[in-house]
Amino acid sequence: MQELADLVIVNASVHTMDPAKPDRMSDALAIRDGRILALGSTDTARAVGPGTVVVDAAGGALIPAINDAHLHFVSAAMAAFGYVRLDPSIAPDWAAVVDIINRAPAGEDGWVRAHGWDEVLLGPASGYLLDCRPGTPVVAFDRTGHQLLANSEALRRAGITAATADIDGGTVVRAGDGSPTGLLQDGAMQLVSKMMPPVPNATLRPALLQLQEQLHSLGITSLTDPGLGPASAGLMDGAGSTAALELLGDLAADGELTLRINVLMLFAGTGGADAKAIDEGLRSGLANTYVNRGIDPEQLRIAGVKIFADGIPRSGTAWMSEPYGNACTHGHLVIQGADDAQRVAELHRILRLINDSGLQAGVHATGDAATSAAVEAIVAAADGTAEAGSKVAGNRHYIIHGAFTDTETLATMASHHIGYSTNPLIREEAGDMMRQVLGEERFSRHQPLHSALEAGVHFNLASDAPVTSPDWRRTVAAAVRRATRSTPGSPGDPERITGLQALAAMTIGAAWQDHAEHFKGALIPGMAADLCLLSNPWPDDEEIEKLLDAEVRLTLSGGRIVHQSNS
């Protein structure tokens, strides 16, 4: 007997992203019970019954829903809906930042929390907030999640003085006399963040639901939040606490979570990770937070552990094989250890612990030396753990950002099934500063997307929101163009990829990272009906910017309509 569809979409340009047939297209799609029932006008016509809803796509592109494989959901929610906003459209210079801070109301806990200033656009940050709001603690997080500015009162409450020592993987920026300027970088951010009052659920819960709605309006139904847990004070704005991890579980149990979310736990922040902290975190039972709560793991699951191997080039904390920046530094791993050899050995111990726990490791590595060391540590940790009869190593550890990866390292990643998640929109927005720090030749090799594709690496593209916009259309365009704010991309850039290759990286490629390519990421019968209908056909690469004008008409998650435009 012919099964009848709940919903049919006709007159569409269906990009299936079928990994077995990458160029497979169709013109119609039928859905039943949250799964794709049929493709093609002939088969879908047979599935139309009296109760079937029929949607006319009018030639628009129908694509798998977007899976942002690196989006700080909790922090992005607070940045968009919970904090005083300092993004460039509102605060275009430091004078505007100071003015906004001086006028902003304090929260119920007496703190002023702000987010979004961008040093690339505003210039050096030291000292600007020190004298703001005497007696009221102020903290302002930057867009990257690697710096914060505090005023004198916040520094006083945190006990930060000229005598405060830097910590592993972090810097207390100082004036000429040694006094703190209020700028804290990387691991040093936790000196303030860890003593701030936690964000109350009454603030966080509505922010999460508002961001969920916004992401659905963009066609996003899946994401990985890379770093929730006890070390949240050392990452982004510190909002991704263990309490936030539990709140996500409450939303899922209550049926309010319509995003599919994978979580990486954070047991050590942006600096100073060691095997002891990771071992204690793994033994804490946090990985079982959602077990026995009736939560569908296809909706919400704890996937693994995030580790910071190094920092970022602009702070001089990326570990590079050649010197860079005004300080002419190589940087180093931010793992604990007295020298490079000890830090590398500690990284190996950390990766072995995570691998042996059966969890996935997402390793932040931006410098080429850090990426190479992380790949070597993953190979050593996973040696002999490939699933019997499978081509895929079981845990699917992956490199986060991986800005510099040579041919040999890419080959190793491909042969050992080590994933790669990177962020073209960061390259576009911060590229001018990175070009100055790294030099033109080295910057030209930044984010080797085409090389990764040719090597056969499992890779995906992600936003890293709130560091950049979660609008995936901008990420796709950035991957195709490889431009910066001041410089158009070169048509001859060998690391360009096509728009459809970028789309695959944000759908079926991201599903691989989630151990989920068997049920999401492609529009083929039997897969989850996670999809996005655009108002326009998919543009040619020569006109990829037209993608930015395409409206998201409809977003489905498991066959459920989670966004529908009014037009």
Image: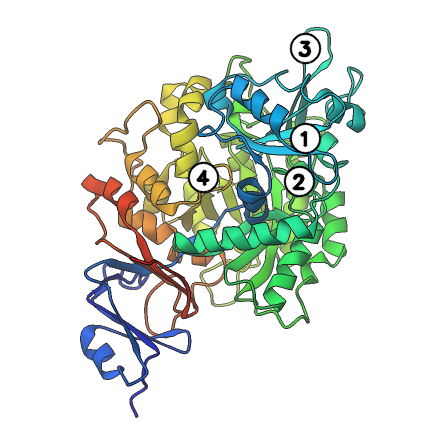
Number of the label disc, if any, that sits on residue 238:
2
Number of the label disc, if any, that sits on residue 175:
3
User: Do tag 4 and tag 3 residues touch (Cβ < 8 Å)?
Assistant: no
Kindly state the secondary structure of the residue where label 4 is placed.
helix
Marks 1 and 4, how far apart in space? 32 Å
Marks 3 and 2, how far apart in space? 26 Å
> In what quadrant of the picture does the C terminus appear?
bottom left
Residue 34 in the image: x percent, y percent?
42, 74
Foreground pick, 364 / 412: 364
Foreground pick, 495 / 499: 499
Q: Earlier in the sequence, mark 1 or mark 4?
A: 1
Q: Amino acid at mark 1?
A: Met
Tell me if I can see residue 265 in this picture: no
Residue under circle 1?
189
Q: Amino acid at mark 4?
A: Thr
Residue 267 in the image: x percent, y percent?
70, 46
Tell me if I can see residue 441 in this picture: yes
User: Do tag 2 and tag 1 residues touch (Cβ < 8 Å)?
Assistant: yes
Marks 4 and 2, how far apart in space? 33 Å
Q: Earlier in the sequence, mark 4 or mark 2?
A: 2
Q: Residue drawn at (51%, 36%), measured in percent from left and top? A: 371
Image quadrant where residue 233 sits: top right
Kindly state the secondary structure of the residue where label 2 is placed.
loop
